[in-house]
Image (cartoon, rainbow, N blue to C red):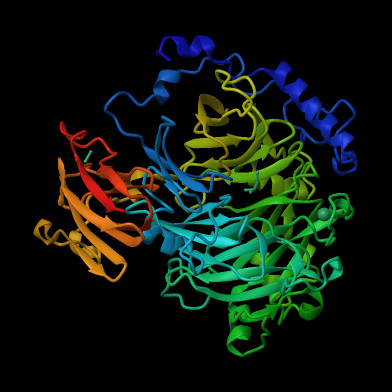
Amino acid sequence: MSKNEAPASATPTDPARRRFLNTTTLAGIAGAGLTMGLAGCNESGKPTKAAAGGAASAPAAAAGEAVEYSKYEVPPGQLDAYYALSSGGHSGEVRIYGLPSGRLFKRIPVFNIDCLVGWGITNESKKIMGTNADGSLKYFTGDTHHVHPTYTDGTYNGKYIFVNDKIHGRLARVRLDTMECDRITEIPNVQGFHGVFPDKRDPVDANINSTTRVFCGAEFQIPTPNDGHDLDKPENYFALFTCVDAETMEVRYQVKVDGNLDLIATSYDGKLACSNQYNSENGVHYEQMMTAERDACVFFHIERIEAAVKAGKTFRIGNSPVPVVDGRKAANADPKTALTCYVPVPKNPHGVNASPDGKYFACSGKLSPTATLISNELVLKWFDGGLKEPRDTVVAEPEIGLGPLHTAFDNRGNAYTTLFLDSQIVKWNVEAAIKSYQGDKNAKPVVDRIDVHYQPGHGFTSMGETKEADGKFFLSDNKFSKDRFLPVGPLHPETAQLIDISGDKMKLVADHAVYSEPHDSIVIRRDIIKTRQVYDVAEFPNAVKDPKDCRVERNGKKVTVYLTSQAPTFGLREWTVKRGDEVTIILTNHDKVQDLTHGFAIPKYNVNFIVNPGETKSVTFKADKPGVYWAYCTNFCHALHLEMRSRMLVEA
Ligand code: RUQ
Ligand code: CUA
Ligand code: CA
């Protein structure tokens, strides 16, 4: 789209459409018998005055206001100010965008098979993903929801990013220097592993001021162990909170809880992790999951949990070697020794986020039009026996609108919460919310709202999950795009909408189409990420170190082909194997120029992968089809790229 077209075709707000959408969404939910849960909404499906938190009933912020869209463009040859690291939902991958441009730079395969780079095809990637005894992949599907990088001193250190697989209960780690997945760990005895968050410093050792643990929440309660017993006895289903070592990626311990776990947040002092629970009822059907007026945000006292693990106050589940401690309410009645604290919050909460000043956690109500603000300090006070009720840790509960899901923060004391049902982002002031909760009638928590298109899930501010929150941008990852883009058939792209939050009023400045189905993003300053472009051949133990070493070695029916690539040739012009051989091809790329990647494909054998500069990869397959097979370079590398091929001769 040309610069001149942008203002004309952009419709920053369209309240009429939003109202329509809003009503239909509610109608759908009402049809499902869910109206009971929607406190604060009237029949028309519009937020009531109360739900709007006394906010200006004025139309959404940007209406009528001219936005200088060109200010947010990244001209040719210029670089973006931020990376957005995003999960890819049930595509099983992680993606890297630039902001403010919204340009997609990379898709990082993690739990999925990807033939662009050969993920799930090469031996090295299969080893990371996990294989069965016969070498086939154990799982080749995944559902990535939450991406969170490692911290030092309360901000990102650019080392790793962690991402969950909700389907199979796995945690993956992606290196931020190469932006490739290097480890995947399967978590025992959980299902629906959803929330994930690294710690920000050690709970005990003040010298460790960076991430060493990753906390994982399990959303679905299951029998423990899930081996066929108690199949239809939901009262014996449980969920576990899991701690994984950030460096070794080994599971350290688990905590058995009442209710379920959804999103995870961690405190800046390293002492607490917490998780919202929407199914404190232990229901197995949705209507059972919304019977209680309040569910909870459960806090984990990490130091005490680890002391209990060390002291052996643990049990094991099934064949799992992982020690488990009991974090259920009944076992933790005395605050002074409790491992967990269940803070009651309104109905089926979703999303819990730590404020960048380290003081609060905001837990969204979802079926309640509120956000609950919980004080980090007061939770610690409860654990010290200084508060009567867990609920006394709540310092504010502003009414902000319908279907609140996730909250992000700026550096001026404001919170931005996505409102799924209202299709809005609401900006509310933390201090005003606290004053209002204390009874100050003049305090107006909600300061602004803006329409988004449509139905936002997560929203993220630039650097907003660090103490370096900069208050510049908010990105709204919406679950529906409807009519915002050229139609592309039944599966629509999603919309990521960029909002300038630097002023008093939020301004919608760009619609980015994103491939289905992003859940969560991290908006991270570009100077934090330091990538490398070229590998050192010596980094790979199986490297073919010199092009002169190219050869074929036979050991019975096992054949190893040692190959190199250097534009525009592979190290062997042809090689011969016999039908029935198990062939392993090891390919080292000896081109050391940045961006000089070669591909390697063999027809009819499902071989297709790339080698980046200096990199070595291998594949193993059975040569079961006699004939001539042209192995060729798939990645455009040279004027003679098409000529870059060799023959594999398979003798009958
Ligand atoms: S959850 S839309 Cu998978 Cu992040 Cu809240
Ligand atoms: Cu090598 Cu194309
Ligand atoms: Ca509930």
Q: Residue at x 66, y 83 (%)?
A: 316
**In the figure, residue 508 lies in which quadrant?**
top right
Farthest residue toward the left?
A: 548
Q: Is residue 223 above or below residue 370?
A: below
Relative to 617, 523 lies left or right: right
Q: Residue at x 84, y 50 (%)?
A: 286
In which quadrant is the N terminus drawn?
A: top left
Relative to 387, 430 lies left or right: left
Q: Is residue 516 above or below residue 411?
A: above
How far across and how far down the image is residue 451, in percent? 65, 26
Between residues 68 and 104, which one lies in front from this camera angle? 104
How far across and how far down the image is residue 570, in percent? 17, 48
Tell me which image quadrant ligand 2 sits in: top left
Relative to 514, 254 lies left or right: right
Q: Is residue 10 above or below residue 94?
A: above
How far across and how far down the image is residue 10, in percent? 54, 15
Residue 348 appears anywhere in the view? yes
Q: Residue at x 80, y 68 (%)?
A: 389
Between residues 213 and 39, which one lies in front from this camera angle? 213
Residue 412 appears anywhere in the view? no
Between residues 434 and 416, which one lies in front from this camera angle? 416
Q: Is residue 99 above or below residue 184?
A: above
